[in-house]
Image (tube, rainbow, N blue to C red):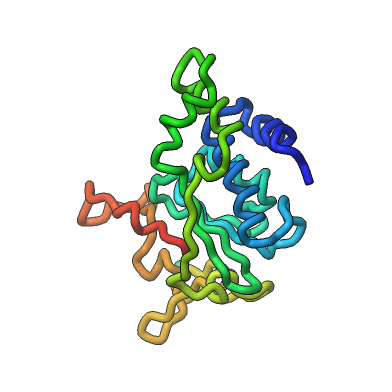
Amino acid sequence: MPTLEELLRLSAERHQHLCPRQVLGVRMGLLAGRLLGLPVPQKDKRMLVIVETDGCFTDGLAVATGCSVGRRSMRVVDFGKVAATFVDTETCRAVRIVPHHESRQRAKIYAPDATSRWEAYLLGYQVMPEDELFTFRNVRLRFSLQQLLSRDRYRVNCEACGEEIINEREVLVEGRVLCRGCAGENYYEWDDEPPHEDEGERLPVGLFMLF
Ligand SMILES: [Zn+2]
Ligand SMILES: [Zn+2]
């Protein structure tokens, strides 16, 4: 198993620097592996992580767990929170981990020589005991894991735009198989066509949900 130092170096490499949130990601990923009893970084896709923000934190998580968007073992739900739920897709056991509400204050105690708050987080987060850094709680998922993961090689074409849809993300509207975009969820409109009537209105960011 790689050490914390090795994981932090790998995370910093893909990120061009090391920052406190990557440290949180790496340490949280290691904790998740232990809580679920799964070896990390995983070589397979058994662990799924649902991360509640994008950014630096996700790089740390990816390095520690082996989960990635590319392997379909990481999903971002953009709640703007440094938090994540880790799922054992074989048993459906899931645990959500967040930084302890006092982790920022405590980091300073563990990094007394830090010259800034940022540096105190960066150093403190690396050495703090886990139970001072994080809290966790078991959760039940409110969506179908099977639907999220879907099936390999499944594909259909949208009856409106003709584009291919994979992973069973099509929707049935009045008997027609449509992509989510054509069903009204498009986040764009064609620049060479007149703007939509409700011009200026922005789609709520909440639109970009899990799947
Ligand atoms: Zn960063
Ligand atoms: Zn379509």
Which residue shows up at 66% across the image and 55% down it? 34
Please provide percent x and percent y for residue 89: 62, 69
* Location of residue 148 with respect to 191 vertically, above or below: below
State whether residue 157 appears in this view: no
Q: Which of 204 and 89 is in front in this view?
A: 89
Q: Quadrant of residue 203?
A: bottom left
Q: How many marks?
A: 0
Q: Say if 178 sits above or below 9 in the image.
A: below
Residue at 34% in and 66% down: 184
Q: Residue furthest toward the bottom?
A: 175
Task: Judge whether 187 appears above or below 133 on screen.
Answer: below
Q: Looking at the picture, how far across and down is residue 52, in whole percent?
A: 45, 51
Quarter location, residue 149: bottom right
Residue 187 horizontal/vertical position (percent): 38, 55
Q: Nearer the viewer, residue 13 or 206?
A: 13
Tell me the residue at 52%/70% (across/down). 162
Could you say where residue 83 lies in the image, as x and y percent from the top left?
47, 49
Viewer-side residue, 153 vs 71: 71
